[in-house]
């Protein structure tokens, strides 16, 4: 038997692994800026480079192997104490991470690495390393003289190992697409199960204890199954946070500031899909903190603060949601400046306004307090985009700030996009699902105080404020006969409160979200669809989208004294 | 239907130890396709646990691993009566005399230097059995 094994089948797994190793080197390296390295950290760094080198050589990436060899030599000297950590060295190591990152990405995309760039890096690394070690010797394998006599054949009676064969330290890597398919199937099963339960209610057989027990147990197992399957897709959010070490380092350096990143609650779990979509908003917030929050070192010293500013990324779970905080110990928001800017931009606010209301202005479209568009945060993206991105993930953003002490942005999001806790409501013959987390309160319209505002339609008094009423039937063109007692469901989306007018409220339920966009096209005001237990399709409302459709979005602030020019 | 290329009752069991998933995959795929049975471990500690609760005909271990490296693992295994004479191969990136001396000192049976081709590995294993 001489299997002709094509090593390219292991490329995907090597790619993932090599990327993780580069991230390890990078984040350890960034840590050395703050405090001297621990021996274990130097070992871990060396091992990471060593593993990339070994894999690269084995799987047929000679340039990656030789580049990593140069890096490994430097790390070996560092580990042996022959080389001391310096700013220059950290810079070179980070540069090495970048070059390796590109080469590794090339494995994934099937592009050839740039030999010139690699050679340049090798020269840079060699300028630190005492002497370049030769790569491995040519003698590739052998047996020592004291070779033990061939072992006696083993008795395999007690073997139990097939079960743990190929176990990967208790975990295995699975393609996301496979998990998605599984989740989708479970979703279908949940729908089928709820249809079954619904039918069972009306069945004569329902009196049969065995039938009822069977239905109950299907219900229970389906729920457990769904929870288990969902949990498979959960990953620690720390994997996202870790990459901000580099962002903080690079951006602070570019701004001539000094800052460190602290991470807390990195073990909190969140849907893998969400982690990717959080990167942009978090990047923007972290950059903002560095650009506008953290002061220049001289200013900080004068204010009696440590010269090195701190950015904190913290995650925690709170009532079925994940709460992510991005905090800095910088200057805090400037109330006067924000009000001035808002006035310039024609964004009005009721006076006297609380700090909370003022801070919320920064989320208005087109708002930016930067004196000049800077390289760092002025990328044509404002906080309005952050809020929109987060609300697309069914989350919310709020800002807290204390002048002189810092700013804290809080993002609250569901743990997953695959299922939703919703309330079913009806308008005419249609049933809609409203995300439960957005609902503030529901009141019969007859008990609410209503007023008509010229050009703005009806508004309703709610907790000492007037909020717009969103007529769902008008927006979606639903013909619905006047119901005797409609309900005003007060919700909050994108930081705006409004009331949705519906005919009746039904039950709270967990629904499996199906994409409308994937099967039809994106529909404004609709976040997705689900299949109800009755077999009917219900649309899941995108409340922020409805506000935009109705013209009540964040750019046009609330208000009884609205006198601005928005039509 | 293809006839099986090996007879299950003569299957030898090999423990392969490496912290790198891709190396582990490559090595286990190679030796499995040659008809051996494979159990993997992710570092020295994991390997010791598996070696204590199972029987193996051969152990292949990487040298550079977190928690417990390959040389330490070989030394520990040789202290266990069941593994005193079982062949153990050390997989290293350095094939220099220094590494060979260390390997010999802990009573490893042989060494193989990375990178190696699947065939080289199989040939070396064949020399042991």
Image (cartoon, rainbow, N blue to C red):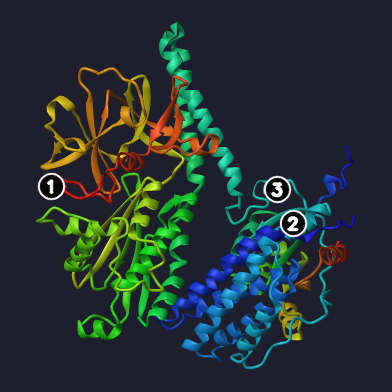
Reading the image, the residue beneath label 1 is A561
The disc placed on residue B55 is none
Residue drawn at point x = 17 percent, y = 37 percent: A454
Q: Is residue A220 above or below residue A341?
A: above
The x, y position of residue A76, in whole percent, is: 60, 84
Mark 1, residues whose alpha carbon is within 10 Å: few (<14), some, or many (≥20)? few
Quarter-of-image position of residue A255: bottom left
- Of labels 3 and 1, the one closer to you: 1
Quarter of the figure that contains the N terminus of chain B: top right
Q: Is residue A498 above or below residue A405?
A: above
Quarter of the figure that contains the C terminus of chain B: bottom right
Q: Is residue A23 above or below residue A475?
A: below
**Distance between the Cα atoms at labels 3 and 1?**
80 Å
The x, y position of residue A332, in whole percent, is: 23, 69
Quarter-of-image position of residue A336: bottom left
Q: Seen in the image, is A206 located left or right of residue A329?
A: right
Q: Is residue A298 above or below residue A563?
A: below
């Amino acid at each position: 038997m001489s299997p002709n094994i094509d090593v390219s089948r292991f490329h995907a797994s090597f790619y993932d692994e090599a990327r993780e190793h580069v991230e390890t080197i990078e984040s350890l390296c960034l840590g050395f800026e703050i405090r001297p390295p621990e021996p274990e950290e130097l070992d871990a760094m060396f091992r990471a480079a060593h593993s990339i080198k070994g894999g690269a050589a084995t799987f047929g990436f000679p340039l990656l192997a030789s580049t990593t060899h140069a890096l490994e030599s430097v790390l070996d000297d560092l580990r042996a104490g022959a080389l001391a950590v310096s700013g220059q060295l950290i810079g070179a190591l980070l540069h090495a991470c970048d070059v390796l990152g590109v080469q590794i990405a090339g494995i994934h995309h099937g592009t050839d690495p740039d030999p010139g760039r690699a050679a340049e890096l090798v020269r840079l690394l060699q300028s630190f390393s005492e002497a370049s070690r030769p790569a491995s010797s040519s003698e590739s394998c052998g047996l020592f003289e004291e070779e033990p006599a061939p072992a006696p054949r083993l008795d395999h009676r007690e073997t139990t190992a097939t079960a743990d064969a190929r176990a990967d330290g208790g975990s295995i890597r699975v393609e996301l697409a496979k998990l998605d398919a599984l989740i989708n199937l479970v979703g279908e099963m949940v729908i089928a199960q709820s249809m079954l339960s619904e039918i069972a209610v009306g069945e004569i057989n329902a009196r049969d204890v065995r039938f009822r027990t069977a239905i109950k147990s299907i219900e229970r197992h389906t729920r457990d199954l769904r929870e288990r399957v969902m949990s498979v897709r959960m990953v620690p959010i720390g994997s996202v946070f870790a990459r901000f070490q580099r962002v903080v380092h690079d951006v602070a350096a570019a701004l001539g500031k000094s800052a460190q990143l602290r991470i807390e609650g990195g073990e909190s779990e969140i849907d893998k899909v969400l982690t990717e979509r959080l990167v942009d908003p978090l990047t923007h917030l972290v950059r903002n903190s560095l650009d506008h929050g953290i002061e220049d070192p001289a200013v900080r010293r004068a204010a009696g603060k440590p010269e090195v500013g701190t950015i904190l990324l913290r995650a925690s779970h709170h009532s079925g949601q994940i709460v992510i905080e991005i905090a800095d110990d910088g200057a805090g928001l400037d109330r006067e400046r924000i009000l001035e800017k808002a006035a310039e931009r024609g964004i009005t606010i009721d006076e006297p306004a609380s700090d909370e209301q003022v801070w919320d202005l920064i989320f208005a479209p087109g708002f930016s307090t930067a004196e000049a568009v800077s390289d760092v945060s002025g990328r044509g993206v404002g906080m309005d985009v952050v809020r929109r991105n987060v609300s697309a993930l069914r989350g919310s953003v709020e800002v807290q700030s204390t002048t002189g002490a810092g700013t804290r942005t809080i993002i609250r999001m569901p743990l997953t996009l695959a299922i939703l806790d919703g309330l079913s409501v009806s308008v005419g013959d249609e049933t809609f699902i409203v995300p439960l987390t957005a609902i503030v309160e529901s009141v019969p319209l007859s008990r609410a105080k209503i007023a008509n505002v010229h050009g703005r339609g009806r508004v309703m008094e709610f907790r000492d404020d007037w909020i717009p009423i969103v007529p769902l039937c008008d927006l979606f063109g639903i013909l619905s006969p006047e119901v005797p007692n409609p309900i005003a469901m007060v919700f909050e989306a994108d930081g705006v409160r409004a009331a949705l007018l519906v005919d009746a409220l039904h039950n709270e339920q967990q629904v499996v979200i199906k994409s409308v966009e994937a099967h039809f096209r994106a529909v404004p005001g609709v976040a997705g669809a689900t299949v109800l237990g009755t077999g009917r399709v219900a649309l899941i409302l995108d409340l922020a989208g409805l506000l935009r459709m109705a013209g009540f979005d964040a750019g046009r602030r609330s208000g009884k004294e609205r006198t601005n020019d928005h039509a | 239907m293809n006839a099986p290329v090996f007879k299950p009752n003569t299957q030898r069991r090999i423990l392969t130890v490496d912290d790198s998933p891709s190396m582990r995959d490559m090595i286990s795929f190679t030796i499995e396709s040659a008809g051996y049975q494979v159990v993997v471990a992710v570092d020295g500690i994991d390997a010791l646990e598996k070696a204590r609760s199972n029987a193996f005909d051969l152990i292949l271990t990487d040298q550079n691993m977190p928690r417990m490296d390959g040389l330490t693992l070989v030394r520990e295994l040789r202290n266990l009566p069941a593994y005193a004479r079982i062949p153990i191969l050390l997989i290293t990136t350095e094939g220099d005399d220094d590494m060979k001396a260390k390997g010999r000192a802990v009573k490893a049976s042989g060494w193989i230097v990375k990178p190696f081709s699947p065939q080289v590995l199989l040939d070396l294993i064949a020399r042991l059995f």
